[in-house]
Image (tube, coloured by chain):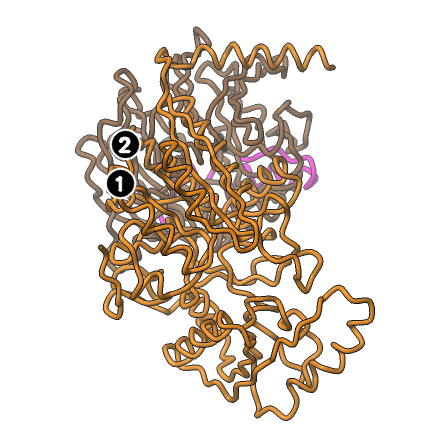
Chain colours: A orange, B brown
Amino acid sequence: MKALRALFAAMLGLLAATIQPANADPLAVKVGVIHDAHSRETISILDIPPADDFVAGARMAMDDNNTTGRFLDQFFSVVDAKLAPGEDPVAPLNGMLADGVRFFIIDLPPAEVLAVADAARASGTLVFNAGAPDDRLREEDCRANVIHVAPSRSMLADGLAQYLIWKQWRRWLLVVGSHPEDKLLADAYRRSAKKFGAKIVEERVYEDTGGGPRSDSGSVQVQRQMPVLTQSAPDYDMLVAADENEVFAGYLPYRTWDPRPVAGSAGLMPVSWDASHELWGAAQLQNRFERLFKRGMNARDNQAWVAMRMIGDAVAHTRSADPKTIHDDLLSPDFAVAAFKGQKLTLRAWNQQLRQPILLTDGRGTVSVSPQEGFLHETSELDTLGFDRPETKCKLQ
Amino acid sequence: MQTSMKRAGRAAGALALLASLSAFSGPAPATTAYITNEKGNSISVIDLDKLEVTRTVKVGQRPRGIALTKDEALMFVCLGDDDTIAIIDTKTLKEVGELPSGPDPEQLRVSADGKFVFVANENDALLTAIDIATRKVVSEFPVGVEPEGVAVSPDDSIVVNTSETTSMAHLIDWRNKKVLANILVPPRPRYAEYNKDGSELWVTSEVGGTVSIIDPVKHVVAQKITFDVPGLAKELIQPVGIRFSADGKLAFIAMGPANRVAVIDAATKQVLKYLLVGQRVWQLELTPDGKYLLTTNGVSNDVSVVDVAALKVIKSIAVGSFPWGVAISKQ
């Protein structure tokens, strides 16, 4: 069996050799991946970030790009910089810039996204924000050298809101965490409610008082805390939780005072991707990822994969590794990304946000995908999600 | 719908013959369409004289690609979730064997001489050639990521495979067993088809929303067809299956969730008409006389029948759950 396999591999190698172009000097495209390590303090043990979180997606897309590159004489590589807590991303950025890296895929907090974008600007470098959901990065603080692959908070909130409206679950109890990100997410839900005609019947705040989620008898307390948090609420259809730091939302399902479903940061969650998504051929992508990394593909992995595939497709189209040429190709009307979400993804020219459907997942499967039927738009129904062109505050420069 | 006396007589004869035999061993009636039902795990058998489903046969899991042998004695059915290709006797509709497909087979194509079947192997990024007589793999060619559509030139000289994630059409010189060209096309190429004289290779890009017309000699995309359906979001335009009319003058393109078949003048490449069919139209096939075009409509669980001369949808036939592929036998 082993000998057979070796023979087969040799045959494959031979075949590959016959299709290898004669040019001995392939077009080399180095992509820097700079990312924070996300907290291991997740409510579910299943959500603890793996060691190769985020960068695994870029690596798989690198393989995909290199398969195409084998036919086009192009070679892609990833330079990974996983930051320690508090580490400045500009130092590794400068190191890679000095090595000639002109494409970066990043998962960083908003202030650091801007720091990286501004430090990279002089060299004409293109930065793909595949992590931060902050609307301000797409609006008042937008940058001409940043492409946003991650959906914004407003896109995620609108994706959920459209489904709840379609279901006629219009009365929401909004429970918000005490961290700044939670407040921004709550802003997005308030905006979505107004935009699509839902009513927030009451808002409550859950204060983060610290303490780890892994304690042995935590469940006893939780079973008492969550009903108290949600008792005596006005009549509502759906509890919407805004908790980006995994402090409480994961404890809400099945523990609310009234028997009501939970959505937002737990329960029915609006996401760019989930390891359980298998529609539109996504099972193929999930299988490849599982084979390579022995785990499921999370939303961060997927966003990094999409970013790297965008770079790969544009390099394949243009036969160039020049960031300006790539940027122009990404913004051209012909550019579209295939990302297993049932339709093509394109860039919003006014703020360089990737248009994309929002998956609604319960972590076991895709419950629905927004935009929902009936939410119409004159140019693209995907632009019913998030801030649209007429309301944008972005001036690209 | 008009039915000639001769056809009516033949249908009545077939009916009598069917009635005289047990339901489990009856021969397939004349001019028959076989529809794979991806979720129903079955094949719907349609009598094309009556335009009715006469039988539904259980097969393995997730049947999609389907092809008949040249003598139409057997059909090959890709069973994606069973990681195999079933060989089914068209007379008895019983499984008589398997082809060595590799994991998750989806599309396949029989060579014009009827001796080989070419299968796209998603997991290994390979195009596999299987000798039909011996049922053994005879060649494998490395292609792009997620190989999908398979086409063969009318003279069997070139085998084509499209790879979805690599977004390429790979042209393989079948006589010399080597890859000739790898041609970049818009995203997610799903299906490839030569025109009748083999002078053009048409490739649909599901996500790109286009049809690329490749010059198979020069190995370049010579022309691209785009679509614009008034009142329909451009993201819904997702071309998949391709068929040419019997005289080669018209091309039919299944448009997926656009729920339409585009009719294209094969000479001028102009879209002449959009035919409204069922939901998520996937694959197409013409009857041997060229009179009807059948479309598989995955979401609405039916098959639309198009009168090719009139360019009108004349009937919708309910089949199993998520119809995907279609093959038509003339006997």
Q: Amino acid at mark 2?
A: Thr
A239 in relation to B144, above or below: below
Q: In front here: A344 or A212?
A: A212
Q: Residue B136 sits in which quadrant?
A: top right
Residue drawn where x is 19% and y is 39% of the image = B270
**Residue placed most toward the observer, B186 or B201:** B186
Q: In the rendered view of the protein, which quadrant contains the C terminus of chain A?
A: bottom left
The region drawn magenta spans: B1-29
**Circle 1 is placed at which residue position?**
A329
Residue A46: image quadrant is: bottom right
Q: Are marks 2 and 1 in contact (CB under 8 Å)?
A: yes
Taking the image as shown, residue A15 lies to the left or right of residue B210, namely right
What residue lies at 60% left-to-right and 34% top-to-bottom? B104
Residue A268 figure quarter? bottom right
Magenta span has B8?
Answer: yes
Q: Which residue corresponds to the image point at 61% horizontal and 35% vertical from the top-left? A: A292
Structural crowding at the residue carrying mark 2, measured as other residues with C-alpha within 10 Å and reported as few (<14), some (14–19) or many (≥20): few
| Marking on residue A318 | 2
Question: On the rendered structure, is B259 left or right of B320?
Answer: left
Q: Which mark is residue B161?
A: none
Residue in front for this viewpoint, B262 or B304: B262
Percent x, y of residue A73: 37, 21
- Where residue B118 sits: x, y (%)? 51, 22
For mark 2, give the secondary structure. Answer: helix
Image quarter of the N terminus of chain A = top right
Q: Is residue B50 visible?
A: no
Q: Position of residue A186 (x, y in %)?
A: 47, 76
Left or right of B155? Residue B177 is: right
